Structures are given as structure tokens and as C-alpha cells.
Image: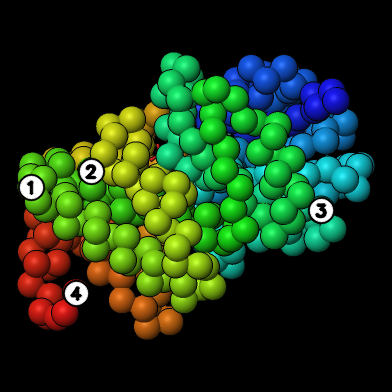
């Protein structure tokens, strides 16, 4: 059976372009849309069987709103590949898409997927998660290739939060390496960081085991250990004493963790959930503390069982 699809990718940044490459390699008909692009949004999304969103968090609501005004097939599947939290309502990207398109299946795509490695043709794996299993399986079939191994998952919230929360930890990991704190410190940071992700993620309704998968531990290992990660780069440079504004002015692309940290800390403190590493990352981003002071604060917390 011919399973070639018409795919629209909205957001033509680093990730949108890498996803376009993967989809074109599978011979699907792919059109990219961005604010600065040549194609009108309607021309790109209206014929699409699958719409993949790779816009950064700050653009998700407005792009969803623009698409809502257009004429789509009732069968169009939405795939969201954004990693972030809405600063006002604290919604995840898939929750925003679902609120605009309550009758359409929404699939979350997340995993250890550094776009530059994908553009070099290197192999990787990812997860597509949905409460609509058939839609997740369709996206799995459509995107799977010798370069891109796609797993399905039935916990979209857990998959989405793994990708989102690890961005804040990647800032911490970059700072840890920027301060040259060594391998033991990094291992402790990542292990306790995973505990933090699971603590808040399960409180919000995700499954604990999801965080041990590709979209949780997997993505954390990739971004927390790679200078290709923009969040890691941000943390590394904060540790060198640069200010947030100085770093963001020169950073290539989006470091979502810088925006996620504030909303995450606000929710966690309202809900009384301890997330000490993310808390210190937020203070570092706000310029309230240096990276070295953040380390001291973490080391001198009350002693307790693991
Ligand atoms: N790069 C990567 O390796 C990966 C990134 N991600 C996630 O994907 C998302 C995008 O990342 P990435 O592509 O790297 O980021 P980039 O900064 O490279 O691109 C961001 C894209 O979002 C668009 N955008 C931003 N604001 C708006 C808006 N208000 N309206 C319309 N479009 C908007 C930009 O459009 P314009 O060009 O017009 O500004 C651009 O196309 C992030 O959430 C990131 O966490 C997930 C996995 C891997
Ligand atoms: O999420 C990513 C890889 O999976 C990309 O990480 P950065 O956004 O930190 O570059």
C-alpha cells in the first residue's frame, strides 16, 4: 500500500528543518511554513494529512490560533515537537493544540534528537506518544527509517514533560561542566535531576516509568552532555560569568529552559513540590546567585535519605 503522506511542518527553525529532512528521506510530500517563509500558512496546512509543529514555545498559541481559522480535514493528525511550558497558563504544547483542535488526534514527539546530529545523517531514536494509539502508530510508520527509529508510547504527558523539564537540567549540567566540577558531580546532578523530573512529572499526572525512557533519561543524557544543546551552552556560559542577556543575544536558536524555569518554579512552589536543582537554575538565570553559590546551596541542603 502506498503510505506516502502530505506533511506540513510549521516552524522552520533547526528542529523543523531536521524533521523535514527525515520526512523527505521517506519520500513524503513535505512543505515547511514559517513567518518569514514564501508559502501562505493555508497553502501549507490545508492539504496536509499530518501537521508537525516545531515552533518554539512562545509561538505555539498564535500559530494554533491561525491554523484554527483555516479549513482542515477532520482526519488531520497534529504532531507537536515543541519542548516548553506556556508561561501564563502553564499548559504544555500538546494541551494547547488539543484546546484548539479538540476533535483531532494529537501526538507528542520527543526524544534525544539534537538537530545538528540528525542533519549530519547520524542515527537516533525518538518517541511518539498519544492517547490515540492509531495516530501514534501512523506517525511511527510515516517517520521510521534506518536513521530514525520511532517508538510509540501511551503517556503523552510524561513524554512531553521529559523533554521540557530536562531543558532546565541541561542548563545546570552546562554550568556544572563550565565550573569543571568533575564526573562525580555531574553524575550526582543528573541522577538527582531525574528524581526531580519524576517527582514533579508524576504529581502532574505522568507515569514514572516514562521518565526512564528515551524522552526522559534519554533526552537528558543527550542534552546534558552535549555542547550542541543550546540549554547546555547557556548554563556553561552562565558559569563563566556572562549574563543571560549577553548569552541569549549570541545564542544560535532557542534555549527553552530559560523560559521554562520560571513557570516551573512558580508551579512547584504553589504546589509545595521540592525541585532544588531547578530552583537554583532559576535563581542563576535571574542573576540572583552565581553558579558557584548555587553549588554550595545544593551541597548544604538538609541531609536526608536517598
Ligand atoms: N533543535 C533541536 O535539536 C530540537 C528542538 N526541539 C524543540 O523544538 C522547538 C523549536 O526548536 P528549534 O527549531 O531548535 O528553535 P529555533 O529557534 O531554531 O526555531 C524556532 C522556530 O519557531 C518559530 N517561532 C518562534 N516564535 C514564533 C511565533 N510567535 N510565531 C510563529 N513562529 C514562531 C521561529 O520562526 P522564525 O524563524 O520566523 O523566528 C522558528 O521557525 C523548541 O521547543 C525546542 O525545544 C526539540 C527537539 C530537538
Ligand atoms: O531537545 C533537544 C534535543 O533532544 C535540543 O536541545 P536544546 O534545545 O538544548 O538544543
Q: Nearer the viewer, mark 3 or mark 4?
A: 4
Tell me the crowding category of disc 4: few under 14, some 14 to 19, or many 20 or more residues within 10 angstroms, Cα based: few
* Outermost residue toward the front in this view: 1
Sooner in the amino-acid sequence: mark 1 or mark 4 = 1
Question: Which residue is disc 2 drawn over?
Answer: 174
Question: Which residue is disc 3 drawn over?
Answer: 104
Q: Nearer the viewer, mark 3 or mark 2?
A: 3
Tell me the crowding category of disc 1: few under 14, some 14 to 19, or many 20 or more residues within 10 angstroms, Cα based: few
* Relative side of 168 to 28, left or right: left
Q: Position of residue 246 (x, y in %)?
A: 28, 38
Q: Are marks 3 and 2 in contact (CB under 8 Å)?
A: no
Q: Are marks 2 and 4 in contact (CB under 8 Å)?
A: no
Q: Position of residue 174 (x, y in %)?
A: 23, 43
Residue, x 16% and y 50% (percent of image)?
186
Residue, x 40% and y 45% (percent of image)?
219
How far, Cα to Cα, is label 3 from label 4? 43 Å
How far, Cα to Cα, is label 1 from label 4? 22 Å
Sooner in the amino-acid sequence: mark 1 or mark 3 = 3
Identify the mark at residue 181; answer none if there is no mark: 1
| The N terminus, quarter of image | top right
Q: Position of residue 156 (x, y in %)?
A: 60, 57
The one of 227 and 304 positioned closer to us in this rendering:
304
Residue, x 58% and y 60% (percent of image)?
155
Q: Secondary structure at mark 3?
A: loop
How far, Cα to Cα, is label 1 from label 3? 47 Å
Q: Are marks 1 and 3 in contact (CB under 8 Å)?
A: no
How far, Cα to Cα, is label 2 from label 1? 11 Å
Q: Quadrant of residue 298?
A: bottom left
Q: Is residue 26 above or below residue 133?
A: above
Sooner in the amino-acid sequence: mark 2 or mark 4 = 2
* Relative side of 214 to 221, left or right: right
Amino acid at each position: 500500500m502506498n503510505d506516502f503522506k502530505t506533511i506540513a511542518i510549521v516552524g522552520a527553525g533547526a528542529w523543523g528543518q531536521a524533521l523535514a529532512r527525515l520526512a523527505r528521506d521517506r519520500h513524503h510530500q513535505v512543505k515547511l511554513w514559517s513567518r518569514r517563509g514564501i508559502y501562505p500558512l493555508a497553502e501549507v496546512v490545508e492539504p496536509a494529512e499530518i501537521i508537525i509543529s516545531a515552533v518554539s514555545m512562545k509561538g505555539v498559541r498564535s500559530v494554533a490560533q491561525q491554523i484554527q481559522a483555516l479549513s482542515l480535514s477532520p482526519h488531520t493528525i497534529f504532531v507537536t515537537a515543541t519542548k516548553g511550558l506556556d508561561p501564563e497558563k502553564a499548559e504544555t504544547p500538546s494541551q494547547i493544540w488539543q484546546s484548539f483542535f479538540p476533535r483531532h488526534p494529537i501526538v507528542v514527539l520527543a526524544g534525544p534528537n539534537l538537530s545538528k546530529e540528525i542533519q549530519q545523517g547520524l542515527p537516533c531514536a525518538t518517541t511518539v506518544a498519544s492517547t490515540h494509539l492509531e495516530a501514534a502508530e501512523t506517525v511511527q510508520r510515516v517517520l521510521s527509517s534506518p536513521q530514525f527509529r520511532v517508538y510509540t508510547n501511551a503517556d503523552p504527558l510524561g513524554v512531553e514533560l521529559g523533554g521540557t523539564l530536562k531543558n532546565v537540567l541541561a542548563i545546570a549540567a552546562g554550568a556544572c561542566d563550565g565550573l569543571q566540577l568533575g564526573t562525580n558531580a555531574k553524575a550526582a546532578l543528573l541522577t538527582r535531576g531525574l528524581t526531580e523530573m519524576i517527582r514533579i512529572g508524576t504529581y502532574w499526572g505522568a507515569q514514572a516509568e516514562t521518565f526512564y525512557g528515551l524522552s526522559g533519561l534519554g533526552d537528558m543524557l543527550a542534552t546534558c552532555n552535549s555542547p550542541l544543546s543550546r540549554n547546555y551552552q547557556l548554563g556553561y556560559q552562565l558559569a563563566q560569568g556572562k549574563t543571560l542577556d549577553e548569552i541569549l543575544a549570541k545564542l544560535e536558536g532557542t534555549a527553552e529552559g530559560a523560559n521554562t524555569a520560571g513557570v516551573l518554579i512558580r508551579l512547584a512552589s504553589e504546589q509545595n513540590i521540592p525541585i532544588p536543582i531547578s530552583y537554583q537554575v532559576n535563581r542563576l538565570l535571574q542573576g540572583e546567585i552565581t553558579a558557584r553559590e548555587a553549588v554550595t546551596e545544593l551541597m548544604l541542603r538538609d541531609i536526608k535519605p536517598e
